[in-house]
Amino acid sequence: MKILVVEDEKKVARFLKLGLEAEDHQVDNAYDGEAGERMALSGQYDVIVLDIMLPKKNGIEVLRSIRSSGSATPVLILTAKGSLEDKVEGLDKGADDYLVKPFAFAEFIARVRSLGRRIGAEKSTTLKVADLELDTLTRKAKRGGKEIELTNREYALLEYFVRNVNRVLTRTVISEHIWEYNFDTGTNIVEVYVNKLRNKIDSDSEKKLIHTVRGAGYMMKID
């Protein structure tokens, strides 16, 4: 699964990331509420682990924003606030589970697995945009029934576009999500990979899917 951990205590965030990766999950970290909200709304995560006491925007506000967007991604609240009132508020605002610090890591992993099974039973492994199809289980892509050969990075970029169809994605956002480092304005790696994708999925089709938004970034667009 791909998991987002929104936790401002970097030692805790690193501990959770390493533990989840040891269980063969892919993990991204956000260290404040605003970054966590932006990443959560990208729609690319299977489970979100969310602290409440966060800088810039608290976890309850982030949770409210996630649910207001229509997202049903499972959210596990992980926090030191363990009163009954806090739990009720978190669950009422749309959390799927609530774990109080300090916690046993084995219990944390079990709860994440449970949330993953819940959404996995409901979620199709096929993503479709126009005549483009992605199988997220096999990481294969087809357009018009014809299989497209993609590298791992190309597939990750294509899936990110598909999950954010009709939404402008800046070069910085793409870089942070696909390459997982702070964007260097001196590199053209995003342009290189976008052009590779265009050549593979759009060159033989009359209907173009990947568009440049001048001065802003890129968009996978369908009418």
Image (cartoon, grey):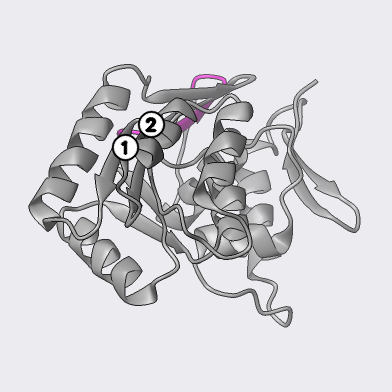
Q: Which x, y percent locates residue 75?
A: 39, 38
Q: Which x, y percent locates residue 153?
A: 47, 57
- Secondary structure, mark 2, is helix
Dot 2: few (<14), some (14–19), or many (≥20) neighbours within 10 Å? few
Q: Which mark is residue 84?
A: 1
Q: Residue at x 71, y 50 (%)?
A: 169
- Secondary structure, mark 1, is helix
Q: Would residue 115 appear left or right of 42 to someone viewing this image? A: left
The residue closer to the viewer here, 90 or 107, is 90
How many numbered marks have been drawn onto this rendered protein structure? 2
Vertically, is 53 above or below 126?
below
Vertically, is 22 above or below 100?
below
Look at mark 2 in the image and give the residue it sits on.
88
Q: Which x, y percent locates residue 183?
A: 64, 74
Q: Mostly what secondary structure, the magenta segment? A: loop
Q: Is residue 139 visible?
A: no
Q: Quarter-wise, where is residue 195 in the image?
A: bottom right
At label 1, the amino acid type is Leu
